[in-house]
Image (spheres, grey):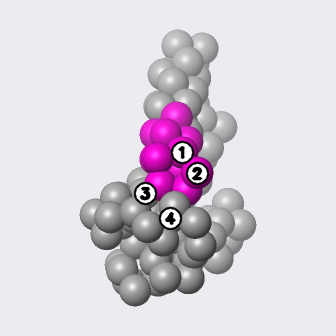
């Protein structure tokens, strides 16, 4: 699973650690504050890092309750990315 997210993970990490990459994006993302820009890409990086672990753990040994908890965590990450994306991209 990690091989499937290697390229997006490296790109998100590169965008999070290099504030000059903000100039590559047009629109509101290029006009966002440096802190907001980096926070957005760090959240994306953390989500991509957590994804294989959550999927692997879920496949290995999850009960119904545990699946609900993991689903809620993933949903919170997706909501956080959507909110930050709306704030800084659109």
Q: Which mark is residue 6?
A: none
In primary-sequence order, the first of circles 2 and 3 is: 3
Q: Is residue 67 left or right of residue 73?
A: right
Q: Would you call the spot at circle 3 few (<14 residues within 10 Å), some (14-19), or many (20 or more)?
A: many
Q: Which residue is mark 3?
A: 40
Residues under labels 4 and 3: Cα distance?
A: 10 Å
Q: Which mark is residue 29?
A: 4
Q: Is residue 36 left or right of residue 51?
A: left
Of 39 and 45, nearer the camera is 39
Q: Which residues are magenta?
A: 79-90
Q: Position of residue 87 (x, y in %)?
A: 46, 47
Q: Which mark is residue 90?
A: 2
Q: Which residue is mark 1?
A: 86
Which corner quadrant of the image does residue 42 belong to?
bottom left
Is residue 18 among what the camera can see? yes
Labels 2 and 1 touching (C-beta < 8 A): yes
């Amino acid at each position: 699973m990690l091989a499937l997210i290697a390229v997006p993970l490296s790109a998100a990490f590169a965008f999070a650690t290099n504030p000059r990459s903000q100039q590559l994006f047009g629109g509101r993302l290029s006009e966002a504050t440096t802190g907001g820009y980096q926070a957005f890409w760090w959240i994306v990086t953390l989500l991509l890092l957590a994804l294989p672990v959550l999927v692997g753990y879920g496949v290995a040994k999850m009960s119904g309750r545990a699946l609900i908890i993991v689903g809620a965590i993933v949903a919170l990450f997706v909501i956080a990315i959507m909110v930050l994306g709306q704030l800084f991209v659109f």
